[in-house]
Image (spheres, helix red, strand yellow):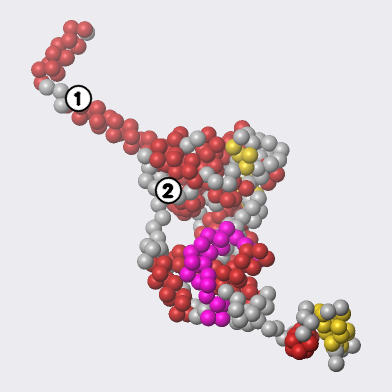
Amino acid sequence: MSLFKRGNVWWAYFYIDGVRHQESTGTSNKHLAENIEHKLRTEASARRHQLVEYDLDLTVAALAARFLADGEVRPHHIWHLKALLPFFGDTLVVRLNRNMAREFRLWRKKQDVTDATVNRALSVLRHILFWALDETLIETNPMARVPLVQERRIKRPVMTLDEEALLLPALLDYLRGIVTAALDTGMRRGEVLKQRWEDVDLSRKLLLVSSSKTAGGESREIPLTKRVQGLLEANSRPEGVVFTLNGKPLSWIRKGYLGGIKRAGLRHFRFHDLRHTFNTRLMEAGVIADVRMALMGHSGGSNVHSIYTHVELPAKRKAIGQLEAWVNQQQEELKKDKEQKNASTKERSESSVPGEIRGTQAVEEEDAR
C-alpha cells in the first residue's frame, strides 16, 4: 500500500529506480485515490522509459496557441493562421488528413485566392505540426506528405525610368529616400526599414544589411550607387535606424507609398516590385545570375553547388557600376527620344498653319530684315 492520508487528502508515495515520488491525489475518497495513484505510477514509469502519452483531444486552435506562445513565430505565420483557424480550428489534430487539405483548398479558392496563397497557408500548418512533433506534443505529422499544387508564374511589373521619374517627386520626403534605396539596392521593405547607421560605411561606399528574413541575406555587402551615397551622406548619423519619421523608426509605409503611386498616376506597383525592378535592371545591364543573387540575398534553392558560391566584393562593385552605366545610357536615350518627339511635333504644328498666314509671316519677316 503506497497511499497515506494527510489531513483529509490521500497522498501517493512510490519508488522507481530508487527515486521516491510523492504527489497528492487531491481526494478523500480512497477508491478514487487508488486509481489516481495507479495512473501516477504508470506515467512516471513511462517517463522513465521515454514513453509519451499524447493528448488525443488537442485541437488545431490549441496547438496554434502553444506555437504562438513558445515557437519561433514569424509575421507570415500569424497572417496565414487567420485563414487556417476558421477552417481547422476546432478539428482534432489526430483527425487531420489529406482530404481536409483538399477541402481547405477548395474553400479558399471560392474566396478568389490563388494557389500560391493556399500553398503558403498549408506550409504554415505543416510547419506548426512539425514543431509540435519536435516538442513531443503529437506522435506524427498528418500533413507531412500533403502535395502542394504547382504554382503558375506571375508576371511582375518592372518600373521604367520614366515611371520612376514620376514617382519620386510625388512621394513625401521621408518615403523618397526609402524608395530610392529599394530601387538601387534591391533590399526588401523590412531590410530597408531596419537598416542601421552602424552598418553603413560611407568611406568605402558600402552597406551591410542589418536585418534580413533569410540567413543568406543577413550582413550581405551592397555597394552604394552615387545617388544613394549622396542621400546617406546628406543625412549621416553615428548610430540608429537610417530611415525614420520625426526621429522614430518606421514599420508601416504602405499607405504613404500607395498614395505616392496614385498621385504620380502610375499603374499599381507593390513595394516588393521595386526589388524585382532592381534585379531586372541588373540583368539588362549584363550582370550574371550568381552576382545578382549575392546582391539580393537570395538563397541558392535546389542548386547543390550554391553553398560553395561566394561572390567577392569587387564583382559586386562592378555590377553596381554596370547598373549605373545602364541607367545613364537609358536616360540619355529617353532624353533624345523626347527631343525628337518635340521637334517633330513643332514641325507638324508649323506645317498646319494656313498658307495665307504663312505668306503674311514671310512678308513680315522680309520687312523686318
Tell me the distance, in whole angstroms, between the alpha carbons under discs 2 and 1.
Answer: 40 Å
Q: Nearer the viewer, residue 253 or 203?
A: 253
Magenta residue check for 182: no
* Residue at point 61%, 55% (across, down): 212
Residue furthest out toward the left? 356
Residue segment shown in magenta: 71-95
Count residues near mark 1 (Cα–Cα under 10 Å), then give few for <14, some for 14-19, many for 20+.
few
Question: Which residue is more in the foreground, 279 or 320?
Answer: 279
- Which structural element holds mark 2? loop
Residue type at numbered disc 1 = Glu
Label 1: which residue? 350
- Picture quadrant of residue 305: bottom right
Residue receiving disc 2: 269
Q: Amino acid at mark 2?
A: Phe
Q: Nearer the viewer, residue 91 or 164?
A: 91
Q: Main secondary structure of the magenta part?
A: helix
Can you tell which mark lies on residue 206? none
Is residue 95 placed above or below 299 in the rendered structure?
Answer: below
Q: Is residue 331 visible?
A: no
Q: Where does the N terminus fall, quadrant-wise?
A: bottom right
